[in-house]
Amino acid sequence: MSLEVADLTFRYGSKTALDAVGFIVPPGRFAALLGPNGAGKSTLFGLLTRLFTAPSGRIAIAGHDMARSPRGALARMGVVFQQPTLDLDLTVRQNLAYFAALHGLAGREARSRIDAALDRLWMRERASEKTRDLNGGHRRRTEIARALLHRPSVLLLDEPTVGLDAAARTAITDHVHALARDEGLTVLWATHLTDEVANDDQLILLHQGRILADGTAHELHGATPLREWFLARTGAEA
Ligand code: ADP
């Protein structure tokens, strides 16, 4: 199930943060939304998650129009925000159980979904640990597992590797690529780091609120290293 954005414009007062942004991420595709700081990535996530609404344009999640059927659209979406949102005093399992309960899941069904989600992120053996005792990478994995509990078709992640060391960053980037490849999840992964983009990913380049490029990563940057290609188009330090 796909993610569709069309002609999305958003302003903070006189500042245009998004200018006629449009793209489609097809089912099962990993799309990297790449842009330097200030490009408009968080604003786009705010609109996709209905934190705020755009005066113009259209968002559809797995065929559900965000303006006309927001509940249907949000139900098909899993989100990992940039700021961690775990309760550090709860165990991994308790954090997931709380979220499951919010989605009306309890008992055996909740337990089996929690186990399956933890297995997908290689976190099952840590289920009884307090999230406070986990390192940053494992906390992030817990949040991704939690975002999968209600079986979304589209997973949104806003700079999910911020603050992680190189090994944890690679592990999480690989895990989420595998979720798209093996399970058909549609992924939108916002980042300003070019090394998180794989050659076969869909690459959506956002700069100053505009989409500058959208296509398969290696087809866009060709023989030029992605980092150089990105720098040349945005003037940003990658
Ligand atoms: P990114 O997430 O890619 O760093 P943002 O979506 O945070 O980009 O910001 C896009 C643009 O909108 C930037 O120029 C930023 O300064 C501006 N902006 C973001 N939030 C606000 C706000 N609350 N008020 C005014 N301008 C904002």
Image (cartoon, rainbow, N blue to C red):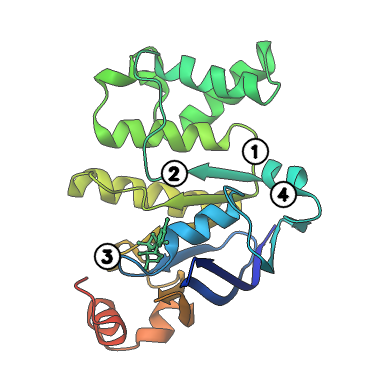
From the image, tell me which residue sits under label 1: 151
Which x, y percent locates residue 30? 50, 61
Asked whether 204 or 220 is in front, the reply is 204
Q: Earlier in the sequence, mark 2 or mark 3?
A: 2
Q: Ligand 1: does it lie within 8 Å of the C-beta at label 1?
A: no
Label 2 vs label 3: CA separation? 20 Å
Characterize the local packing of mark 4: few (<14), some (14-19) or many (20 or more) Cα atoms within 10 angstroms.
many
Q: What quarter of the picture does the C terminus occupy?
A: bottom left
Q: Residue at x 30, y 46 (%)?
A: 171
Question: In this image, 99 relative to 122: left or right?
Answer: right
Label 1 vs label 2: CA separation? 17 Å
Where on the picture, by quarter, is residue 42? bottom left
Characterize the local packing of mark 1: few (<14), some (14-19) or many (20 or more) Cα atoms within 10 angstroms.
some
Residue 120 in view in this figure: no
Which x, y percent locates residue 44? 51, 61
On residue 177, the disc is none
Amino acid type at mark 1: Arg
Q: Secondary structure at mark 4?
A: helix
Residue 203 in view in this figure: yes
In this rendering, the label closer to the viewer, 1 or 2: 2
From the image, tell me which residue sits under label 4: 73
Q: Earlier in the sequence, mark 1 or mark 2?
A: 2
From the image, tell me which residue sits under label 2: 81
Label 4 vs label 2: CA separation? 17 Å
From the image, tell me which residue sits under label 3: 195
Amino acid type at mark 2: Phe
Amino acid type at mark 3: Asp
Where on the picture, by quarter, is residue 192? bottom left
Asked whether 27 or 189 is in front, the reply is 189
Mark 2 and 3 residues: CB-CB less than 8 Å, in contact? no
